[in-house]
Amino acid sequence: MKKVIILLMVALMTVLGMSQQAAAYDVELMPQGSLDLNGQTTFLLDVWFNADTDGNDFSNWQFSLFYDTSELTWNSSNTVYGTMPLPLFPGSFSGPNENTSGHIELFDASKFPPNADDAYVTGSLLLATVAFDVAPGINMPAPDGAADVWFDTTSTVAGGFTIDDTAYFMDSTHPSGNIMPISGDTIDVVVTPEPISSILFVVGGATLGLRRFRKKRRIS
């Protein structure tokens, strides 16, 4: 019996070890602080590259974002790149820019000079912190339940990543089939009603109910 238990434990540890080795890299959206926009004037969103367990050679990256213009406005002056490991150089192209409202194009970094060795990335690498201004009066309605910030995976300007000498594209329809894995690809912000508004709503409803109750008593 003991031998069986030991064999099972060895098999379990082997499977766990294989699953850890198989952990893949991805790119992820991660909000700073609360997703509840109530009372906020600025909403900050980090974009992370998460390396696999063995680390990755990193040559360059590029991505674009969509966002909901009814709730947020891109604040380009407070949007910053993360600290790039050498020889990565952020902002080597013309982006990011917003030629179309709600579409921030071309966050990027590449090797500088181009013939330099790749950067070696372990753990998680902060690519950029994207700043948004919260629309005035957004704390009045309830949450809309819709995606508010998300990666562009539908257009040719979406860009991609070169990892371990292989190009992975953000365009999910790219003919190469090498698509960049995404975790947390959409951010749904939440808008809760103000407490005072909730109280007034409850009081108003109770008052209306009491008036109807008194009216029924008079009729009867």
Image (cartoon, helix red, strand yellow):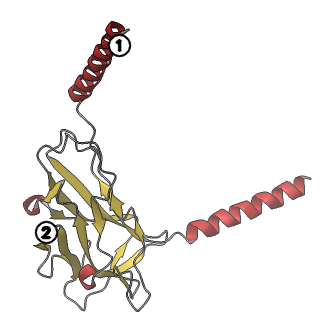
State whether residue 100 appears in this view: yes
Which amino acid type is shown beneath numbered disc 2? Answer: Ser
Where does the image place residue 60, in percent across and percent down from the top left? 28, 81
Nearer to us of marks 2 and 1 is 1
Q: Is residue 6 above or below residue 84?
A: above
Circle 2 residues within 10 Å: few <14, some 14–19, many ≥20: few
Q: Quadrant of the C terminus?
A: top left
Closer to the N terminus: mark 2 or mark 1?
A: 2
**How many numbered badges does the structure rendering display?**
2
State whether residue 88 appears in this view: no
Which amino acid type is shown beneath numbered disc 1? Answer: Lys
Q: Residue at x 30, y 65 (%)?
A: 150
Kindly identify which numbered label has been placed on residue 216: 1
Q: Secondary structure at mark 1?
A: helix
Q: Which residue is mark 2?
A: 101
Circle 1 residues within 10 Å: few <14, some 14–19, many ≥20: few
In front of the other: 45 or 24 = 45
Where does the image place residue 46, in percent across and percent down from the top left? 27, 59
Q: Give the spatial CA distance, label 2 vs label 1.
A: 54 Å
On the rendered structure, is 85 left or right of 132? right
In front of the other: 86 or 178 = 178
On the rendered structure, is 113 left or right of 25? left
Quadrant position of residue 154: bottom left
Residue reaching furthest to the left: 77
Quadrant position of residue 6: bottom right
Where does the image place residue 213, in percent across and percent down from the top left? 34, 13
Q: Secondary structure at mark 2?
A: loop
In front of the other: 13 or 128 = 128
Q: Residue at x 27, y 16 (%)?
A: 207
Q: Residue at x 15, y 76 (%)?
A: 91
User: Do the residues bearing badges 2 and 1 touch, measured as CB atoms within 8 Å?
Assistant: no
On the rendered structure, is 126 left or right of 181? left
